[in-house]
Image: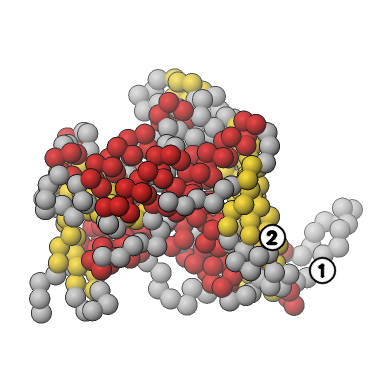
Amino acid sequence: MSEPRVLRIAMNGITGRMGYRQHLLRSILPIRDQGGITLADGSTVTVEPILIGRNEAKIKELAAKHDVEHHSTDLDAVINDPSVDIVFDASMTSLRHATLSTAIGAGKHIFTEKPTAETLEEAVDLARQARAAGITAGVVHDKLYLPGLIKLRRLVQEGFFGRILSLRGEFGYWVFEGDQQPAQRPSWNYRLADGGSMTTDMYCHWNYVLESIIGTVKTVTSKTATHIPQRWDEHGEAYTADADDAAYGIFDLETPEGDQVIGQINSSWAVRVYRDELVEFQVDGTHGSAVAGLNQCVAQQRAHTPKPVWNPDLPVTESFRDQWSEVPANADLDNGFKAQWEEFLADVVAGREHRFGLLSAARGVQLAELGLRSAAERRTLDIPELTL
């Protein structure tokens, strides 16, 4: 048996919450420790991470803790190392265009968090650079690999809903201000100058979720808010939170069959959770409905739909939640980030495009830009088709 091929991956921004927890701890290290992945031809490819960050002490500590041999604070030097195959970026959005441009220019394959850029112009520029360079580029679309949404997409593909009428999404939780209890998110998320914004952050996700579950996003009507105008940073210092911490969006969607669907998604870091999961999507159709979260998905067929009667004078005696049926996974579903990493690595070895690339990410940036503009101008905006 031949030795496995080793892909060396420069992992930038790995000391951040997402970079560390989801990409290093739950994706790359498990792939390494399981001996890599087996490709369709029976060969094996494994990974060797190189940890990159600005804080040398923290990078060294992580490397020692997880038995990672190589680490550096010199991002450019690692990118230009001929032995490096892939550059992964989970650093600040404001730095991403420059980082990815340098990596593409060095001929590296890239895998990146989103948004891929602060502006649509920069996001499209990256997609054009990657196409011209002939590299494999992948963008994290983690929501689509979650068990709940895998089940929901399967229901759509199998025609469970009949004609789809609407989608409603609820996302968010209370992020503490940082004065009495530490905030669960970094302070830059709430400063416009540092690239913070609920719309910029989450509309990039919602675009690929809506595209993959329902269809093309045709228009956006958005309302944004900064509900908490003052927060406290990692050093206990008060600062003005001028970025939107909530976004309320309505989207006109078109299915591949040409049906028109209304989408609504509320996103907030100033809401307390009274739902089963931190994000939930409900799809309603003529033949059935379903509610999907990160892991679970429940459904109700037309024939099994009860007939509630409105009567505010009597207490409710039926349990509406008990009237829905659990949708089975029918497969072993791995961590969503890890599953996409494995798919991307296989694409790199095969020399093919990753299905969730930089043009898809650019459409997410486009939706975020138009969402912010819709909120500022208080009107509905059409979404032009995006091509390279």
Question: Callout 1: helix, strand or loop?
Answer: loop
User: What quarter of the picture does the N terminus occupy?
Assistant: bottom left
Q: Is residue 17 left or right of residue 288?
A: left
Whole-percent x, y for residue 283 in the image: 64, 62
Residue tagged by mark 2? 260
Instruction: Give the quarter of the image for residue 178.
Output: top left
Between 310 and 170, the residue placed more toward the observer is 170
Q: Position of residue 168 (x, y in %)?
A: 64, 54
Q: Amino acid at mark 1?
A: Lys
For label 2, the SS is strand
In the image, residue 120 above or below residue 154: above
Mark 1 sits on what residue?
Answer: 307
Q: Residues within 10 Å of mark 2 (few under 14, many from 20)?
A: some
Residue 135 at x, y = what percent?
A: 27, 56
Residue at 58 percent across and 76 percent down: it is 158
Q: Identify whether 355 is placed above or below 128.
A: below
Q: CA distance from mark 1 to mark 2?
A: 26 Å
Q: Is residue 299 visible?
A: yes
The mark tally for this picture is 2
Residue type at mark 2: give it.
Answer: Gln
Q: Are marks 1 and 2 in contact (CB under 8 Å)?
A: no
Drawn side of residue 23 relative to residue 231, left or right: left
